[in-house]
Image: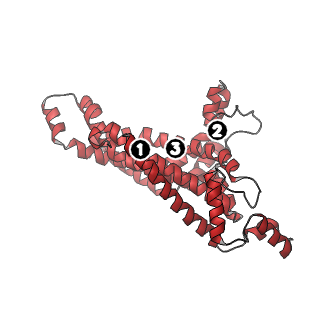
Amino acid sequence: MWTYLLRRLLLLIPVLLGLTVLVFAIARLLPGDPVALAAGPNASPAEIAAYGREFGLDRPLWEQYLRYLGGLLQGDFGVSIYTRRPVIEDLRAYLPATLELVLAAMTLAVAIGLPVGMWAAVQRDRWPDYLSRVLALGAISMPRFFLGLLLQLGLAMALGWLPLGGRFPITEELPLRVTGFLTVDSLLAGNFTAFWIACQHLLMPALAMSLSPLATIMRMMRGSTLEVLQQDYVLTERALGLPQRLIITKYVARNAISATLTVIGLYFGWLLGGTVLVETVFDWPGLGLYATKAVVTQDFMPIIGVTLVIGTLFVLVNLLVDLLYGLINPKVRPG
């Protein structure tokens, strides 16, 4: 197990190195002049050139990349051309908000999708199964940003049950930052009022993001459960007179969830890179909104930093999924 883990972590190095080359080249070869945009419309050519030299943009592309790579090895993600802030500070500020949102969305998707998918398989060709198919098709077909707008119109503006957007009201005192997750920090501080407020702000964007993975996980779990139900050992257990609930919970669920784990891991990475629209609709201060502002200003250092962080998390999550395979099914446990 430890040998496998070490091998996978070592493979992470060439993957991230190739990602830095690809993203750095694309970001620098895009049309436009980020230096002129950051310097302002009234800047003279001499001022623009001096601004570019300050950030080393007058050097050859390969030298810029090597300097950037050397900074990465020291934990330096560069400096934003537009704001002059170190990118690592912005990533530390915005990453917890995105992770909290993605984890909340995936928790909803997994907690609802797995049992509903299994229930639909057990009730095959009955009304619960047909209902799950219709709901899954509708959930996958609806864009997340459109669902977010509907939630805002219904739950926030019409009914007034939830706040319209943002992560925490500016009139309330934030809990002491420990993890960066407002829900967790509120509980650590024993401030249940702040925890309830944070959950209210988190609910709508998490619902909007969870709908598509929920539908996919539900359909995947249904298909896996139907396949396991046809296995000989399940038919033997039924012939021996074991209760249906025991068969489903002890034998079927454990084997059916293995195939669904792959989808869960892939969706986690997909949600990390796909928070832009939801964070923009709900004004959620996360990596998606941060990357959107960087794209608008052609500020390529934050774009590269966000891409590397998402890529690293995606690889680590899929490594965790591979390890979970071994815990659920010892037959595929890595050596």
- Pick the residue in front: 50 or 261: 50
Q: Quadrant of the N terminus?
A: top left
Label 2: state its secondary structure.
Answer: loop
- Disc 1 residue crowd, few under 14, some 14–19, many 20+, Cα 10 Å: some
Residue 268, horizontal then vertical, whole percent: 48, 48
Residue type marked 1 = Leu
Q: Marks 1 and 2: which is nearer the front?
A: 1
Q: Which of marks 2 and 1 precedes in the sequence?
A: 1
The residue pinned by badge 3 equals 105
Residue 11, horizontal then vertical, whole percent: 44, 53
- Disc 2 residue crowd, few under 14, some 14–19, many 20+, Cα 10 Å: some
User: Residue at coordinates 21% horizontally, 28% vertically from top-left?
Assistant: 243
Residue 124 visible here: no
Q: Marks 1 and 3: which is nearer the front?
A: 1
163 to the left or right of 20:
right
The residue pinned by badge 2 equals 180
- Disc 3 residue crowd, few under 14, some 14–19, many 20+, Cα 10 Å: many
Label 3: state its secondary structure.
Answer: helix
User: Residue at coordinates 40% horizontally, 54% vertically from top-left?
Assistant: 137
Residue type marked 3 = Ala
User: Residue at coordinates 23% horizontally, 31% vertically from top-left?
Assistant: 244
Q: Total number of numbered labels? A: 3
